[in-house]
Every structure is written in structure tokens, then in C-alpha cells.
Amino acid sequence: MEPLELLECSSSLAREPLDGEQAAGVARVFKALGDPVRLRILSIVASHQGGEACVCDLTAAFDLSQPTISHHLKVLKEVGLLTSERRASWVYYRVVPERLAELSALLSVPATV
Amino acid sequence: MEPLELLECSSSLAREPLDGEQAAGVARVFKALGDPVRLRILSIVASHQGGEACVCDLTAAFDLSQPTISHHLKVLKEVGLLTSERRASWVYYRVVPERLAELSALLSVPATV
DNA sequence: CGCCAATATCGATACCTATCGATACCGTGA
DNA sequence: TCACGGTATCGATAGGTATCGATATTGGCG
């Protein structure tokens, strides 16, 4: 739904000012991270056995309705932080490490210039 | 207003699931980054001559009212991403590199386990 | 073929927030 | 001390979103 590269090639926020379009793309991803439930979902999936978790694992981990968890999974998937795969009746989610790495690089500050 | 350490000592989201309190703290910071204007402010300040920019530099860079820029600066400051210093009539903002580094570390994925 | 369990979508609602104009605050210089 | 320019705060408003219950969808199984 969207190319994986948030910025063409540069890495850091401090390199040069983001233009409006770049900022809008990056902001979408950070906005997805800006919710405690989604952060916990991400960390549960990332640290889960085998690097994946099914929706039932996640609904069990929260005191929230199943539609709410499904909504958060959709948000994380839309910004490229998660992928999903259906196997039998269950849907398994995995993190996209390249996406996290992109964000990590964006925030890594080269020693104060 | 808040200790700088988002997590006690661990580094990565994938290490182990965040608890609710940790997630809430981290989410506040990512939420601040989840707005295109704030991302651009941050990148303008970070890449500005001398590592600092005054409010007048920022209001000039956007087609937004001065109170709106001031609001965004307050949000970034409240989550520890910016500091400010008044000199004469002007207020200068700087990024807090440690804060960016924390987030960067949080998102850095150890090779798929 | 029809039922059941797992997941996704829909519609409604209460809360949050980005934005503005108006105004208050605060150094500086006359 | 007063006026002025730079910045912050306030109050209002329009649009966004997290959450829910109800319902649709999908695949396995008897």
C-alpha cells in the first residue's frame, strides 16, 4: 500500500529539514506508535515465540474488546509495521524489522555538528 | 517534568513486552512525533545553524499562526524532545539528542531471534 | 451442507487535538 | 516608566480517533 522507504536515502532528522510530504509520511508511522495499546501489541508480537503472534494471543493480553484489538492491528499494518498471514482459522502477525530500522535510523543523531 | 529514561535499562521493544506504564510513557513521546508540523519543527531545529532556532525562525517556515507554532513547541518540550532558553527578546530551542537516542534504541531490532 | 470459532467491518459515541483570533506576559530601548 | 516586539496562554471550534456492541466474513469440521 506504500513503499517501504520513508525517505529516499538520507537517514537522520538532523541532516536537513524534512519537506511537507516527507514529514506527512513519517508522521503517519509515528502516530501509529503513539498509542500505548499499539506499542504493547508491537512489543508482544516482537518478543513472542517465533516472532509472531495470533490475534487470540493479543486479545487475551488486554482488557479490550476483540474489535478494538483488530482496529489497532489494522493501523499498525497500514503503516507497514506489521504483516499478517492467515493459517487455518488463525491470523498471525509479525513485525517488519526493516520498518523499525528505518525509524531508528531517522532518530539516530549524528554527534552534535 | 519527567525523568529522561523511558525504560529502566532495557533497550528494545522486542526484548520483552512493555507493561502498561512503560507503554504509556513511550507513547506520549511518539504521539508528539506523530504530527507533520512537529516533525518538521524538530528537523528544522536539529539542522539549523548552531543546533538551535528561535521561534521567529519557525513561524517564518510555516503557513501557520504563531500561537499554533508555540503550541507545537510546548508539546515537544513537554515530552523532553526540545529544550528552550530565552536570550534577550528571543527564545531559542534545541533538540535533546539523548531523547532521540533513547527512541532510536527502542526501535532498533536485534537480528531476528 | 450447515454450524462453530476466529477475525474483520460497521455505526455510534465520547473524548482528544490542531488550529485560530484575542489577549496576556515579558524583555528591551527610548 | 512607557511603548513595542517577541512569545505564551486562553477559549472556541471543527475534525479525528479509541472504544464498544452488533454483525459480516472466513475456514474447518461433523
Image (cartoon, coloured by chain):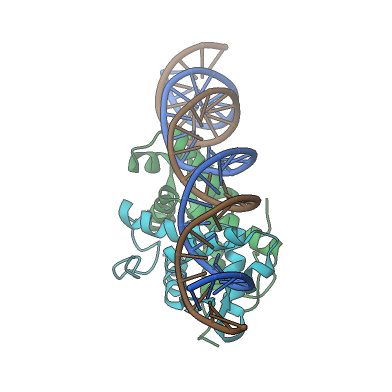
Chain colours: A green, B cyan, C brown, D blue
Residue B38 visible at all:
yes
On the image, the x and y values in percent for residue A110 come to 53, 83
Residue in view at x 43 percent, y 57 percent: B28
Locate residue D2: give its quadrant. bottom right
Q: Residue B25: image x %, image y %?
A: 37, 58
Viewer-side residue, A98 vs A87: A98
Q: In this view, does B45 lie to the left or right of C15?
A: right
**Front one among C25 and A108:** C25
Vertical placement of residue A32 versus B96, above or below: above
Q: Give residue A8's position: percent from left, percent from top.
A: 70, 70
Vertical relation: A81 (above or below) A68: below
Numbered disc total: 0
> Which residue is depicted at the point 40% across and 60% down?
B26
* Front in this rendered view, residue C20 or C30: C30
Q: Position of residue A69 (x, y in %)?
A: 45, 40
For image coordinates 41% across by 51% down, the residue present is A36
Frontmost residue, A51 versus A42: A42
Question: Residue B43, can we see it?
Answer: no
Q: Quadrant of the C terminus of chain A?
A: bottom right
Query: Seen from this angle, which residue lies furthest left?
Result: B8
